Image: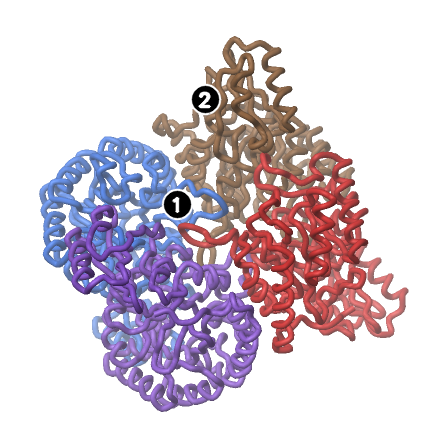
Chain colours: A blue, B brown, C purple, D red
Amino acid sequence: MIIMKAEATKEEIAQVVHEIKKFGLRADVSKGESRTVIGLVGDERKIPFSHFETLPGVKEVIRIETPYKLINREYTKFLENGDGTMEVTIGDVKIGGKEPVFIAGPCAVESREQLFRIAGEAKKAGAHILRGGVFKPRSSVHSFQGLGSAGDDEAREALTWMREAGREFGMPTITEVRGEAQVDLVAEYVDIIQIGARNMYDQDLLCKAAQTGKPIVYKRHFGAGIEEFLSFAEYIAAEGNKNIILCERGILPIGKGKTYTRYTLDLSAVPVIQKETYLPVIVDPSHATGRRDLIMSMSCAAIAAGASGLMIETHYNPKESLVDSQQMITPDELKVVIDTCKSIHKHLAPGVKSKAKVA
Amino acid sequence: MIIMKAEATKEEIAQVVHEIKKFGLRADVSKGESRTVIGLVGDERKIPFSHFETLPGVKEVIRIETPYKLINREYTKFLENGDGTMEVTIGDVKIGGKEPVFIAGPCAVESREQLFRIAGEAKKAGAHILRGGVFKPRSSVHSFQGLGSAGDDEAREALTWMREAGREFGMPTITEVRGEAQVDLVAEYVDIIQIGARNMYDQDLLCKAAQTGKPIVYKRHFGAGIEEFLSFAEYIAAEGNKNIILCERGILPIGKGKTYTRYTLDLSAVPVIQKETYLPVIVDPSHATGRRDLIMSMSCAAIAAGASGLMIETHYNPKESLVDSQQMITPDELKVVIDTCKSIHKHLAPGVKSKAKVA
Amino acid sequence: MIIMKAEATKEEIAQVVHEIKKFGLRADVSKGESRTVIGLVGDERKIPFSHFETLPGVKEVIRIETPYKLINREYTKFLENGDGTMEVTIGDVKIGGKEPVFIAGPCAVESREQLFRIAGEAKKAGAHILRGGVFKPRSSVHSFQGLGSAGDDEAREALTWMREAGREFGMPTITEVRGEAQVDLVAEYVDIIQIGARNMYDQDLLCKAAQTGKPIVYKRHFGAGIEEFLSFAEYIAAEGNKNIILCERGILPIGKGKTYTRYTLDLSAVPVIQKETYLPVIVDPSHATGRRDLIMSMSCAAIAAGASGLMIETHYNPKESLVDSQQMITPDELKVVIDTCKSIHKHLAPGVKSKAKVA
Amino acid sequence: MIIMKAEATKEEIAQVVHEIKKFGLRADVSKGESRTVIGLVGDERKIPFSHFETLPGVKEVIRIETPYKLINREYTKFLENGDGTMEVTIGDVKIGGKEPVFIAGPCAVESREQLFRIAGEAKKAGAHILRGGVFKPRSSVHSFQGLGSAGDDEAREALTWMREAGREFGMPTITEVRGEAQVDLVAEYVDIIQIGARNMYDQDLLCKAAQTGKPIVYKRHFGAGIEEFLSFAEYIAAEGNKNIILCERGILPIGKGKTYTRYTLDLSAVPVIQKETYLPVIVDPSHATGRRDLIMSMSCAAIAAGASGLMIETHYNPKESLVDSQQMITPDELKVVIDTCKSIHKHLAPGVKSKAKVA
């Protein structure tokens, strides 16, 4: 990480970038109001740091020891206006800002009518962003894979509904990509790209999604430690895309015998990640628990732990849902969850609430 | 589980118990205001249920399929006044009642002065119960094992301080037993016996502690599934002691790389266990996280998840503590945690709050 | 699974396939010497099984309850010559046959010279197949990602070396694909495609690799249960490609404290998978342990557990290796490992050795 | 660890011990043929190492950084005859010597007749040591807890059968203790005390069992890392009892979905532990897999990994067994397992075989 002087010129910045490239690395340039920070992408051992300290316009060269450098909280600290956190802005919605954000919608888009009805009801319940799966990652090839898997036309049709529903109800939209071939298509229609837990380690997909420039909701794999999660998130940042929203959605349950939830929600991951990076962290209680009757308590707990938002699966008639019907809540239930979460958020100590804008 | 008629006589109850013993099992008798339920302890397969249905005074015979039967929520449902939950009462303090309960104190009792100072300050901060370790389970034989391990006299002296500090500040006391040989001694001095995570599977210790009749705070092992935790809690109940407070204190972290917390707090265990049993559930964020800077957020999250109380390690000067100094908070910090938790608790939806009295 | 009569005609088979498609599913046709079995790909609940039983040429309709159906051992049982196992044949090499197969080579291809030297020495040590990474999945974007990541030309050059080294020393070759964009390129140059542990869940990549028709070495993710591993392997089979070699390479270590190996080799997975499917199972002790000094003992253990082969990283000078230098063994050490393993294999009880040819 | 000079006198050794005690620690004295090594038990930070270096007779003072010091391989290295391994000798049987040792018998002792029949048949099959459970740790209070739990007389009777069967067939005997109250009783009747996986963390039980001076088979808990396992084994050594046989019996399975084995046998633990300590390591494939049909392959794998022995549950009629009937093998099967294992052991490379005598 190379911190430029406040008075560094464009040419001086360009020279540093040029030198970095000469050593076979890439440069990541972040401009604050009065200062610029340049991160390195690639094997730092190749770099003679002392050389860079002598370049004109360079104030300081700092090594970040964690494998996640570009998303490390240290990184923004040197931007004069930085408090070490960042908002991701999508239209009117700010994730990581002063208020928690609620993402809701069906697990899978099943029809135009289904989607519009849920979108309208979720909006009324207080949701800010509309989710809906078009390409569904499934653990069995014999299960329904989402409308998107039926063919290109079907995918475009379902994505069009997403776009239209988003516009109709004034909600930015999010859908998941499962493979590289879907990235450009999805980026054409929705506002936020989701990369699911099962694709967390899929570095080629991360790069391709990052290159669209769209904000990315990036979910932690259920077998991934936090260091590994952040190290892979770095692949997105290394493409120059820092509009990353990290999402905790449950880790593998421990122990013998019956498991009462699909996964085990790891809520201490929320404050831990907030202390390690400047990125906002949200929580998905639906996939974590897999149980409608636990959504309320785990939503409250997530907000109380400091999460910047929640992603909750919603359906007017959960039993009808083709996928994950056991974890859907109704829009009426969603409203109670959102209202309770907001009221909890108000009573949190300042240090727990997600912090204000950075850059 | 044998449900007696409301009008069943003492003799009829005694006969059922007698018959159960004839088959080599033990009987667990629970009396509600107007009805009695009798649970079986032992291998039910030996029992001809149809025979019991014909005994005088018997209303119904029901099989509970889970390995935890006596602490199963089903068990209290048939007591007419039961809402399926139970309070554990220790003096003026009710765990599992309308208000969350806070247990605080040092990890290890180190001196009379240290204990009294912390007890007084914790009380002022809002704590209800005083904790303090005399026999410390440690993962290394080369570490400080608590004053109790120095000898009988030292153990008695430290336990006397606990009793005196409890009386001085009007707080019930709790300390841990680590082996069977300590049970009677500890029971003589403190109000609540703690069985720690590492002893969770130690069934002979569970039975011995249960036989004292004292309330027991029973901690989940970090490698134990919920079913296993409850199955072992059943050993306590089977001794006729249902004053059990279950405590979640973290499971093994998942994944490769650095672990940012000592354990991973499993907060969905709180509502899950509440749905499975009538016992109150508390949370220990200190051992779960091992980090002072996470106590606030995880305490809030635990209360928001519905926990009936918290157990928090406190020290006026954390750095001085001989054990676990990194996870202690000061009494001033404790006060903020307690106040914030109470305010969150007030705003929870009714279904999340711990329920009212059973029996 | 639809079992056709021995005398069923081509037309009758075609009709069954046609009917399956009418219900929106795909058909997987396996021909034995005198009988044909047709598997279904998709949601079986849509299928009226009783209808299929009445079609001409159909002998029996059987439901397989596991989520892996096409690779289930049940599936081959009905092919008259089936003993429930299958060999995968690549040139002269048979994986899953009477003798264990050894795959060796460098972790990453670094130069033509490095590859040729290792290939020659591995061949002399007794290895049958040459491995070499061109696209390396890495947990940090700041680490060396393999020559393939430097650009298309570099990728083609490294792959050409693989092809040439394979021909020079008479060894089929294997390399890993990390993303969909690499599949066609890799398939052009090497004999076997590897899908690594981190991509195990990447169903779109699985399908694309399967469509090349090449044999696939498919590695279990370190957080995946066996059922999940086999359910995802089914994605490959569902594309009509059953030349699948399953590879165990370690699961997440358990417990607190220092981890002495990179992962924990799960050797009971070998016989378990052999009992569940007809596919051959191999073991990668290099990535599982990450320790040169454990390769010998874990290789012996894997063969003794019944593995059909081993994949071992080899380098003439481990310290020079750009990737995974701590787990490389020298060709001399490889020779001792191979010889010992062969001698152990000879003394195994018949039931433990991998079984003979199926189809 | 204090290494005495070869010519150090008794008095000089006594003085070192005396000085250690003055600092509040205990001393562990190991005598080799011509040299003595003194280990410290307790918090080393209290010790001024430089002071000890100046005491007469002291050659060198070395700090061992691992939490297991007295069982660390470093510890024996300084005994002139040490190759860093140790045999545990029980009568004619040596565990950790040149040949693998086989421990067999029923899971639970059920009757004199059952025990004698199994003992005789196991002996004929090649087993060296007789196992049989009298006090059974069970995860449900409603399950059969072993004859020992029926009362003192029943316990003594079952233990008498063990002693008699051992004498009758010339086999040392082993049984498990589950609580402190059983230790003295069990030590009176059997040759080896077993501490089961669920009691691994029960430090008070470890100390009490160690104090009997009997050899101890100590099983790893299914949630314990290797460092933790060895750290707790140190509690036994710290009582002056180094006749410890470590036993791997499976860790928690990973991943979602069906588990095909009770636990996951961690065979790389065998060579890892052998490199860390001088203690012999054995494997229990019965409890690890819970499946009769996997005993053969996992026994072979364990021996190939370098295990010094196996503990296998045996019953002439597995279905009759009151406990663990699914994992028992018959004496005939046991004979094939033992013979195959011996033949594999002969073909292992010297480095994999368990090493020769130390002290």
Tell me, yes or no, if residue B120 can be seen here: no
Q: Position of residue D151 (x, y in %)?
A: 73, 34
Label 1 – label 2 distance at C-alpha: 29 Å
- Count numbered badges in the picture: 2
Q: Position of residue D57 (x, y in %)?
A: 84, 70
Q: Residue at x 61, y 60 (%)?
A: D333
Quadrant placement of the C terminus of chain C: bottom left
Quadrant placement of the N terminus of chain C: bottom left
Q: Position of residue D225 (x, y in %)?
A: 56, 57
Instruction: Report whether A205 appears left or right of B13.
Output: left
Instruction: Report whether B300 appears left or right of A340.
Output: right
**Residue indicated by mark 1:** A265
In the rendered structure, the residue with mark 2 lies on which chain? B
Instruction: Report whether C220 appears left or right of C290.
Output: left
Residue B77, numbered label: 2
Instruction: Give, as a three-letter code, the residue at label 1.
Output: Leu
Q: Residue at x 35, y 62 (%)?
A: C76
Q: Quadrant of residue C27?
A: bottom left
Tell me, yes or no, if residue D169 can be seen here: yes
As displayed, is residue C257 above or below residue A170? below
Label 2 neighbourhood size at 10 Å, few (<14), some (14-19), many (20+)? some
Residue nearest the observer in this picture, D332 or D173: D332
Question: Could you say whether the residue bearing mark 2 is in a helix, strand or loop?
Answer: helix
Instruction: Report whether D32 appears left or right of C227.
Output: right
Residue nearest the observer in this picture, D189 or D352: D189
In the rendered structure, the residue with mark 1 lies on which chain? A
Residue D354, numbered label: none
Instruction: Give, as a three-letter code, the residue at label 2.
Output: Lys
